[in-house]
Image: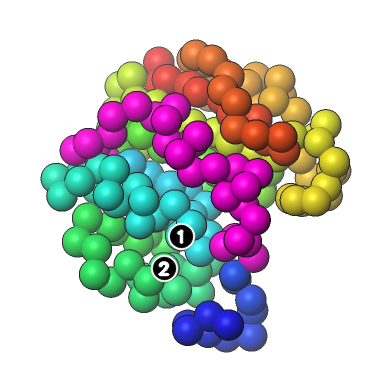
Amino acid sequence: MSKYKIGKKDKSKNNDPFREQYMPKETIFSVFGDITDKKVGDIGCGSGYYTKDLSKKVGLRGKVYSIDVDPEVIEMITYKTSELKNVINTLSNENKIPLEDNSLDIMLSINSFHEFDDKELTLTEIVRILKPRGRFYMIDFSPTSSPPPGPPKDKRVLKEDAILVCEDVGFRFLKPFNVGLYHYGLMFEKK
């Protein structure tokens, strides 16, 4: 049982203990390279599964922006990260993220792309926020993998379609990367 309750909703599914087995953090973090002193956004941060690790990776002069549209999620993650001085928890509207233009080095979307209501508008916001040549790392559930884990197959997005929509809004596709059995990983750069 969580030591922090959030209303009547159970937000703990994002902290599934088996997640590390099918989606190891170090596999994901190895793709980013050295992110010391970087400003990193985690859009759709959910319960903050990656927040503390990202905080350590960016160091004291870096920043982690945990971004979510759910006020209860932001309340929970604020509680969980209250001792971390380099974490900024940000309540957002999906299509209007309250961060300055050209302010982040990296934006992550881990298991959240399939949830974006208007993918083009949300991606356009990410482009706006990233610095020139800033990196966008998208990790999402593959429609070709069998559940569980993840959303129903009809909510999942083909990686080819994800690449097309990202390129349409101002990203250059750099390369795919391996995340595990159930996911695909895509690396982009702001043009």
- Give the position of the C terminus as an image quadrant: top left
Image vertical order of residue 92 relative to residue 128, above or below: below
Check if mark 1's residue and mark 2's residue have beta carbons within 8 Å. Answer: yes
Q: Which span of residues is magenta-colored?
A: 13-39
The residue at 65%/56% (across/down) is 18
Label 2 CA crowd tier, 10 Å (few <14, some 14–19, many 20+): many
Q: How far across and how far down the image is residue 144, in percent?
A: 83, 31
Please provide percent x and percent y for residue 146: 85, 41
Q: Which residue is mark 2?
A: 77
Magenta run includes residue 175: no
Which amino acid type is shown beneath numbered disc 1? Gly
Relative side of 88 to 182, left or right:
left
Q: Which residue is mark 1?
A: 48
Q: Where's the N terminus, which quadrant?
A: bottom right
Depth check, front residue: 24 or 115:
24
**Residue 126 seen in this snapshot:** no
**Residue 175, x across and y down, in percent:** 54, 15
> Disc count in the image?
2
